[in-house]
């Protein structure tokens, strides 16, 4: 959603201005590229090209973890680009995904036949492999291991969609849970986080599943129009023979019931996400992990019980995203943000929704886990202030205007 949508939310305008004019150095200190070897500088350029807003959060990571996460992010983006490329035939794609991790230790492997938007990470893969081989061995082991498992897992769901809710968890584990497990092992290997962070794979997996399920729920229409079916059949199969049927206007009621069921399922990862976040000790790592999670809960609130999901991609406002990005720096503020959006979901649970009991249970549990002193203040709280300011402004302009027209009238009549 563009910048304009935040105009009606002045505190988001404030956040956008602060973000624009460098008021967020604390959250994302700039790093100087001048001293970097050209291949490493090229990798950070790739990062900016593949995810503008998130690149800054990665650059803010401390020590040698920054380069390790940068390379991990680009290697995953390359693997993802192969998986997403529908022009690569399955019999070519399967061996490519299974062997992908072996190219990390080669100097000249590249793929020039991709038509995806991020194809540069495949065409210039030797640049990424060079920087991979410059990382500390422990980081190389983690990244290579995760790529091997993810490549294998991706081949399972290339020509089939998740059927059961367990399949959905398994698919999300391969494309996002493993990212959480890999990142957590990198955090512990950097000694900036306790070993328990890297060892507790269940919590790390939940961090990935909460993000991936949110993306899959949000991107329903975009995906189904490209014949990519990531919603589990166990959920939509109750309402039709084809997933696409959910996009039909006459099926909106069923579609929203299915949507609310999947959002309710995703909300069950919140207790693990909060426990995982509460264990982090390094500020730059905390910010790196917190930002995608608060974006996800805000997106789920925006999608909950919202028929617009079946008519286009529902997104949170840029201003809202920036405001959360700058505030999600402590466990209390993360809890406050989760509490804020969970409360908004609770207020909108339709009493006749098939998932009403399960949704209410997980929402109440989340509100118990996220009780904090300082609530997250978003637009609504400021409305009275805005309205009075707007009225005051209106009165001043009116005064000024009537003043001018009187003078004009007097001059013209004299
Ligand atoms: C990510 C995740 C990510 C960050 C921090 C901790 C994580 C723990 C477990 C799993 C993933 C974790 O964050 C990025 C955020 C991102 O790229 N956002 C995009 C917007 C978007 O919607 O794509 C942006 O431009 O801001 C993320 O979504 N994924 C990701 C990929 C690699 C790494 Cl190293 C970290 C993608 C995914 C599929 C959720 C794993």
Image (tube, helix red, strand yellow):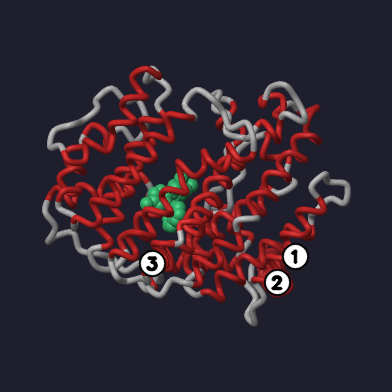
Evaluate if marks 2 and 1 touch, with contact meaning CB atoms under 8 Å apart: yes
Q: Which residue is under mark 3?
A: 285
In the picture, residue 188 is in which quadrant?
bottom left
**Among the two numbered marks 1 and 3 on one chain, the one whose residue lies closer to the N terminus:** 3
Q: Which residue is under mark 2?
A: 368
- Left or right: 157, with 396 as reference point: left
Cα distance between the residues tagged 2 and 1: 6 Å
Q: Tell me the residue at 49%/53% (across/down).
A: 205
Q: Tell me the residue at 20%/36% (across/down).
A: 124
Foreground residue, 86 or 15? Answer: 86
Q: What x and y, as percent, mark residue 198?
A: 39, 62
In the picture, residue 166 is in which quadrant?
top right
Cα distance between the residues tagged 3 and 2: 26 Å
Q: Tell me the residue at 61%/41% (across/down).
A: 217
- Left or right: 353, with 173 as reference point: right
Does any portion of residue 381 appear in the rendered image?
A: yes
Q: Is residue 138 above or below residue 252?
A: below
Q: Which residue is under mark 1?
A: 364
* Mark 3 neighbour density, 10 Å: few (under 14) some (14–19) many (20 or more): many
Q: Secondary structure at mark 3?
A: helix
Outermost residue, right side: 352
In the picture, residue 18 is in which quadrant?
bottom left
Q: Tell me the residue at 73%/57% (across/down).
A: 345
Q: What x and y, as percent, mark residue 50?
A: 35, 44
* Mark 1 neighbour density, 10 Å: few (under 14) some (14–19) many (20 or more): some
Q: Secondary structure at mark 2?
A: helix
- Left or right: 261, with 3 as reference point: right
Foreground residue, 126 or 387? Answer: 126
């Amino acid at each position: 959603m563009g910048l304009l949508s935040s105009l009606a939310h002045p505190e988001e305008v404030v956040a956008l201005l602060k973000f624009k004019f460098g008021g967020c150095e604390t959250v994302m200190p700039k790093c100087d590229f001048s001293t970097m070897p050209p291949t490493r500088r090229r990798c950070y350029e790739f990062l900016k090209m593949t995810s503008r807003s998130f690149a800054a959060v990665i650059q803010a990571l401390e020590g040698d973890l920054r380069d390790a996460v940068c390379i991990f992010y680009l290697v995953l983006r390359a693997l993802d680009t192969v998986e997403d490329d529908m022009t690569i035939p399955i019999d070519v794609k399967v061996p490519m995904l299974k062997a992908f991790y072996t190219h990390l230790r080669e100097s000249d492997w590249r793929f020039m036949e991709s038509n995806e938007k991020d194809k540069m990470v495949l065409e210039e893969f030797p640049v990424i492999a060079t920087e991979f081989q410059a990382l500390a061995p422990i980081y190389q082991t983690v990244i290579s291991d995760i790529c091997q498992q993810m490549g294998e897992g991706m081949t399972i769901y290339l020509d089939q969609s998740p059927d059961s809710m367990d399949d959905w968890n398994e698919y999300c584990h391969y494309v996002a849970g493993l990212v959480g497990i890999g990142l957590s092992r990198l955090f512990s290997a950097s000694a900036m986080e306790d070993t328990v962070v890297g060892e507790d794979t269940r919590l790390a997996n939940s961090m990935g599943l909460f993000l991936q399920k949110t993306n899959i729920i949000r991107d329903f229409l975009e995906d189904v129009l490209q014949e990519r079916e990531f919603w589990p059949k166990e959920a939509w199969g109750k309402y039709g023979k084809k997933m696409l049927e959910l996009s039909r206007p006459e099926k909106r009621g069923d579609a929203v019931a299915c949507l609310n069921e999947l959002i309710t399922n995703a909300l069950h990862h919140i207790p693990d996400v909060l426990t995982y976040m509460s264990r982090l000790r390094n500020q730059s790592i905390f910010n790196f992990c917190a930002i995608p999670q608060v974006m996800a809960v805000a997106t789920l609130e925006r999608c909950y019980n919202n028929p617009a999901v079946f008519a286009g991609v529902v997104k949170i406002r840029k201003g809202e995203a920036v405001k959360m990005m700058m505030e999600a720096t402590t466990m209390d503020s993360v809890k406050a943000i989760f509490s804020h959006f969970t409360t908004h979901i609770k207020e909108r649970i339709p009493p006749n929704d098939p998932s009403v009991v399960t949704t209410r249970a997980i929402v109440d549990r989340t509100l118990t886990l996220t009780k904090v002193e300082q609530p997250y203040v978003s637009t609504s709280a400021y409305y009275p202030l805005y309205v009075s300011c707007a009225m005051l402004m209106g009165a001043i302009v009116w005064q000024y205007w009537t003043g001018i027209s009187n003078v004009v009238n007097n001059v013209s009549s004299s």
